[in-house]
Image (cartoon, rainbow, N blue to C red):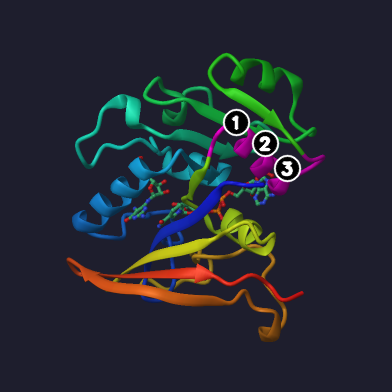
Amino acid sequence: MKPYVILNAAMTLDGKIATHTGSSEISGKEDLKRVHRLRRECDAIMVGINTVLIDNPRLTIHKIKADKSENPTRIVVDSKARTPLNSRILNKEAPTIIATSKSAPKERIRKLSQKAKIITTGNKKVNLKKLMAELKKMGIKKLMLEGGSTLNFSMLKEGLVDEVRVAIAPMIVGGVKAKTLVGGQGIPYMKDAIKLQLKKYHTLGKDLILEYKVLKSQK
Ligand SMILES: NC(=O)C1=CN([C@@H]2O[C@H](COP(=O)(O)OP(=O)(O)OC[C@H]3O[C@@H](n4cnc5c(N)ncnc54)[C@H](OP(=O)(O)O)[C@@H]3O)[C@@H](O)[C@H]2O)C=CC1
Ligand SMILES: Nc1nc(O)c(N)c(N[C@@H]2O[C@H](COP(=O)(O)O)[C@@H](O)[C@H]2O)n1
């Protein structure tokens, strides 16, 4: 049992979700409104700790009209409890969950638990399958995965993503160190690639929106 998971991201034509310096303002204002409508439809938004450290995101609904009560729960996948205590994700705009592992220092957990709910799964890294099961038990039915590259890979590899939605901006930035939509260890052989089915596509402002269903592995 797990929430329905939609991976959503903006990328350049060359598949980058940020430049090598970490700059990530990619899609246009029309797309950002679509993203915030999607945030409003979801019970939770989840990101990896590097996204918090690099972008310091709010992860609230702030590009369209919405009441504070409509903000989804924010989740950070952070095995060592490194989320800074002054990060925007810990503000009072919405509830926050920090998903940690047993490797997190106890003192960090104590401090973070004053500002967020803590869920501990896994020894060194967060056990994403167990985390998803726990979130479902808490009543989270629909979850938006907002990156970054490393967490996207783990979630896809573990078969936890149901849909992928991307906004492709008409830009190219290059850079071997610039993060792509999906990073992590990668899959060695094309025959083992995660297979998708294109369900919808349309332009939005200058961007191209693609929506895919993730096909379940035959293994
Ligand atoms: N354009 C867009 O739409 C978006 C762009 N971005 C960009 O993505 C970049 C960050 O991506 P990236 O550096 O890949 O980092 P992520 O945000 O994906 O965070 C990855 C970290 O999450 C932690 N983690 C814990 N458990 C797991 C697990 N089981 N699987 C995977 N990760 C786990 C690890 O750190 P630890 O071991 O310490 O816990 C890991 O290094 C930023 O530059 C940001 O701007 C991000 C979101 C959207
Ligand atoms: N989908 C999407 N399109 C873009 O153009 C983006 N720049 C991003 N960035 C993501 O949104 C986070 C910022 O959220 P807040 O505005 O602070 O709520 C950022 O961390 C990226 O995850 N996404």
Between 168 and 42, the residue placed more toward the observer is: 42
**Which residue is label 3 attached to?**
130
> Where is residue 197 drawn, in percent x and y?
49, 77
| Disc number lying in front (3 or 1) | 1
Q: Is residue 171 visible?
A: no
Which quarter of the picture shows residue 43? top left
**Magenta residues?**
122-140
Q: Quadrant of residue 160?
A: bottom right
- Write the residue at 40% across / 74% down: 199
Residue located at (67% from left, 47% from top): 1
Label 3 is placed on what type of residue?
Lys
Q: Are marks 2 and 1 in contact (CB under 8 Å)?
A: yes
Residue 132 on the magenta span:
yes
Tell which circle, 3 or 1, labels the residue nearer the N-terminal end.
3
Above or below residue 65? Residue 117 is above
Q: Are the residues flagged by discs 3 and 1 in contact, CB closer than 8 Å?
A: no
Q: Could you tell me the amino acid type at mark 2?
A: Glu
**189 to 12, vertically: above or below:** below
Amino acid under label 1?
Met
Disc ID at residue 134: 2
Q: Is residue 178 above or below residue 44?
A: below
Task: Find the distance from the CA under tag 3 to the CA under tag 1.
Answer: 13 Å
Judge whether residue 172 is colored magenta: no
Q: For the residue with label 2, is its CB less than 8 Å from the closest atom of ligand 1?
A: no
